[in-house]
Image (cartoon, rainbow, N blue to C red):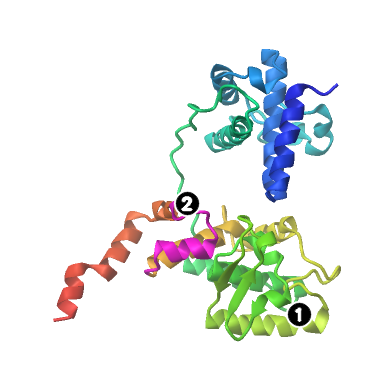
Amino acid sequence: MLTKIFLQMEDFLSYCQSKGLSQKTIFSYDQTLKLFAKYLEVEQGITDATLVTEQVIREYIMSLQERGKYTVVSKDDTKKWNNPDARTDKGKPITKSTINNYIRNIKVFFNFLDEYDMIRKNPVKKIKQLRNPRKAKDFINDRDFNNLIKCLDLSKYSEYRDYTIIQVIIDTGMRLGECLLLQMQDIDINERCIVLKAENTKGKAERVVFYSSEMGVLMRRWIQFKDRYVESEYLFPSKTYKTKIRVSNFEKNFRMYCSRVGLKDVTPHTLRNNFAKRFLMAGGDIYTLSRILGHSSVTVTEKAYLDLTDKDIKKNYQRYSPLAQLKKNK
């Protein structure tokens, strides 16, 4: 028999689907809330969200800080595919970032219940995320990036494709998932711009990104190469299946390329982060960067400034020193 809180969570997830949220976001909500529901039932004897108090949520947050990774699963049958016992990090402390993600998802759930008058008092009103010193995003310098793209074998279809994808991302700042969904009709070769359809973006809003003349040369060459081997509507299709490649497959390939040149802690998302930092270091403004990245607000984009080191700030300052500029214009 389904408990009341399970039905309440199903109502919330249906609401998320009706709003057009991404499957990745909905999956995150689903996993978080099921783990929370199991804790409520087993540890607190609660099967109705209306009975959850602020203190109960605080106790759950404390339990997350005390228990280790993968020591609790929402359903026993998930062990068949998740196989937590085989994970090398099982039992290790859950990171503050992960706990904050749980807190954020739980807050969204109860705010939904509150907005639609399903609860009398909102228990998350005073719940705050854990203080978590922000770690600067990994940066790939010029030498390492050039070594990375040089290690790809351009005589192989898949590596030539990935070679182009890597450079598209670092030149446009788009997300990997957005890049892999690109179709030929989305590219304007003459204007050197790419239209990212609303259904393919994280924020579900259409946006346009532009690429450099250098990327324009690479793009034309790639399209000519692709068309010789694959007839597909996708810009970066699989040669075998002639359809889009999966994010996980590209990530696997990317790890292999990084391994060839000894690069560690570099992911496809590192390329997007690098675009943001390089844009700012080149004198780009935060508003334009926010539009390019497809962020929901400039506030989200401002976090990119936190990644600038003292060395970066010194370099940027020397370029824009007011006194130096005044003396130049004498």
Q: Answer whether labels 2 and 1 touch (C-beta < 8 Å).
A: no
Is residue 305 rendered magenta in the image? no
Closest to the observer, 87 or 197: 197
Q: Nearer the viewer, residue 298 or 129?
A: 298
Q: Residue at x 67, y 84 (%)?
A: 221
Q: Quadrant of the C terminus?
A: bottom left
Which secondary structure dominates the residues rendered in magenta? helix
Q: Quadrant of residue 76?
A: top right
Q: Which quadrant of the rendered structure holds the N terminus?
A: top right
Compare residues 95 and 7 and report the one nearer the observer.
7
Q: Is residue 293 magenta?
A: yes
Tell me the element at label 1: helix
Image position of 25 with respect to 104: above or below: below
Mark 2, residue position: 300
Quadrant hosting residue 216: bottom right
Given the image, on which type of amino acid does mark 2 rest?
Val
Marks 2 and 1 sit apart, C-alpha to C-alpha, by 37 Å
325 up-or-down from 13: above or below: below
Query: Residue, x 73% and y 85% (percent of image)?
Result: 224
The residue that label 1 is drawn on is: 226
Q: In the rendered view, does 252 fall on the left or right side of 135?
A: right
For marks 2 and 1, give the one nearer the viewer.
Answer: 2
The residue stretch that appears in magenta? 283-300
Q: Inspect this view and state whether residue 311 appears.
A: yes
Give coordinates of residue 182: x percent, y percent.
70, 69
